[in-house]
């Protein structure tokens, strides 16, 4: 009787061990879902070939936010503000922490005016910066970048990788 009890306990222990081992071993899983393809970036190419990757400011909320609270802007990054039509544009540097060059553009991405090294606003009231005439779009880049790349009024910038429908 002891022998059969011992054999029964051993069989139960073995069954339990196999059951636990089966539960502990990972079940074959499906492959992880594929990552979405990277979104193409939008770039602005200067006449000398310098390329700036830009975030787009398309909505009034994005345009109001701009580059506020940005502590550092690499020289090859910026923001492109796209508008539906030409108009008098006015930007200020409220809550901006870095100096910027504001490149005022016509509907063909030709430089109409440049506000160079616009400093952050340190106290109210903040001054407004405007181009010499109505413009369509505005490019913001690191302060001093336009001088470093000899960007001038009348130069044509090339916008590459703009998503379909991004231009209003």
Image: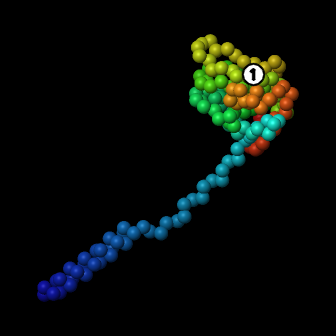
Residue at the (82%, 27%) spot, across then down: 152
167 shown above or below 1: above
Residue at the (60%, 58%) spot, across then down: 34
Can residue 86 be seen here? The reply is no
Counting from the top left corner in percent of width and height, residue 39 is at 68, 48
Label 1 secondary element: strand
- Tell me which corner region of the image, top left, top right, bottom left or bottom right, holds residue 86: top right
The answer to which of 66 and 158 lies nearer the viewer is 158
Counting from the top left corner in percent of width and height, residue 23 is at 36, 69
> Of all residues shown, which one is farthest toward the left?
1
Q: Which residue is mark 1?
A: 115
The answer to which of 85 and 39 lies nearer the viewer is 39
7 shown above or below 27: below
Can residue 147 be seen here? The reply is yes
86 shown above or below 42: above
Coloring basis for residues: rainbow
Counting from the top left corner in percent of width and height, residue 126 is at 64, 15
- Tell me which corner region of the image, top left, top right, bottom left or bottom right, holds residue 168: top right
Residue at the (59%, 24%) spot, across then down: 97
């Amino acid at each position: 009787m002891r022998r059969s009890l011992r054999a029964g306990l051993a069989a139960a222990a073995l069954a339990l061990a196999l059951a636990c081992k089966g539960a502990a071993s990972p079940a074959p899983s499906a492959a992880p879902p594929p990552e979405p393809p990277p979104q193409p970036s939008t770039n602005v190419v200067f006449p000398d070939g310098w390329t700036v990757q830009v975030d787009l400011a398309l909505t009034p909320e994005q345009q109001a936010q701009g580059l506020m609270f940005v502590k550092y802007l690499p020289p090859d990054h910026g923001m492109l503000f796209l508008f539906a039509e030409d108009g008098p544009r006015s930007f200020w540097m409220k809550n901006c922490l870095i100096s910027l060059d504001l490149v005022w553009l016509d509907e063909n991405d030709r430089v109409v005016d440049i506000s160079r090294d616009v400093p952050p606003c340190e106290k109210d009231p903040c001054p407004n910066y405007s181009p010499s005439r109505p413009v369509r779009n505005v490019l913001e880049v690191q302060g001093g970048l336009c001088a470093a790349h000899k960007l001038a009024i009348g130069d044509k910038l090339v916008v590459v990788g703009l998503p379909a429908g991004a231009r209003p």
